Image (tube, rainbow, N blue to C red):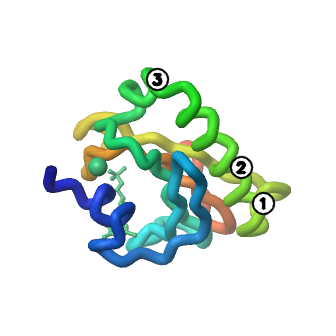
Amino acid sequence: MDCLFCKIISGEVPAQVLRETERTLAFRDINPQAPVHVLVIPKVHVPNFAALAEHPETLAELAAEAAEVAKAEGVAESGYRVVFNTGTGAGQTVFHAHAHVLGGRGLNWPPG
Ligand code: 5GP
Ligand code: ZN
């Protein structure tokens, strides 16, 4: 399967990996939209957030890892956002489920 994030998991495509667990990988987004912008992905290939519901242990580990990333990156106290873009209409461009962990200055909500 030609999947960019599966290639990052296998090491075929390099990434700035921050954390790894049995079921997840966390690495910096190549095009950060905030001072802290980390992607946390399941090692199992599922196309989107909805499909992650079929993997409850992975989903729980991914949530815990997103929180650990926020702590390690120093935004747990100031606040951060965890986003799953789901579907092209919401801006999903990579169809391997991933959580964006966004934090630091420059968070703008509501957008626009
Ligand atoms: P989406 O738009 O699907 O929610 O998010 C995909 C994210 O993957 C984007 O924020 C994009 O910058 C990031 N991305 C795309 N290609 C690469 C890559 O090769 N390496 C890394 N680290 N991030 C990538
Ligand atoms: Zn994949």
Q: CA distance from mark 3 to mark 2?
A: 19 Å
Q: Tags 2 and 1 in contact by the CB under 8 Å rule?
A: yes
Q: Which mark is residue 67?
A: 2
Indicate which quadrant contains ligand 1: bottom left
Q: Residue at 64% of width from left, 50% of height from top? A: 66
Ranked by sequence position, the earlier of labels 3 and 2 is: 3
Give the amino acid at mark 3. Answer: Ala
Q: Which residue is mark 1?
A: 71
Q: CA distance from mark 2 to mark 1?
A: 6 Å
Q: Secondary structure at mark 3?
A: loop
Queried on whether the Cβ of the residue with tag 1 lies below 8 angstroms from ligand 1, the answer reads no
Please say if 110 is above or below 9.
above
Kindly indicate the quadrant of the structure image that contains residue 86.
top left
Give the amino acid at mark 1. Answer: Lys
Q: Is residue 10 left or right of residue 39?
A: left
Residue 109: image location, x then y, percent = 58, 47
Q: Secondary structure at mark 2?
A: helix
Q: Nearer the viewer, mark 3 or mark 2?
A: 3
Ranked by sequence position, the earlier of labels 1 and 3 is: 3
Q: Residue at 54% of width from left, 36% of height from top? A: 58
Q: Secondary structure at mark 1?
A: helix
Check disc 2: other Cα within 10 Å, few if <14, some if 14-19, many if 20+.
some
Residue 85: image location, x then y, percent = 39, 41
Please say if 18 is above or below 110.
below
Q: CA distance from mark 1 to mark 3?
A: 25 Å
Q: Is residue 109 left or right of residue 16?
A: right
Q: Which mark is residue 16?
A: none
Q: Nearer the viewer, mark 1 or mark 3?
A: 3
103 or 47, nearer to the observer = 47
Q: Which residue is mark 3?
A: 53
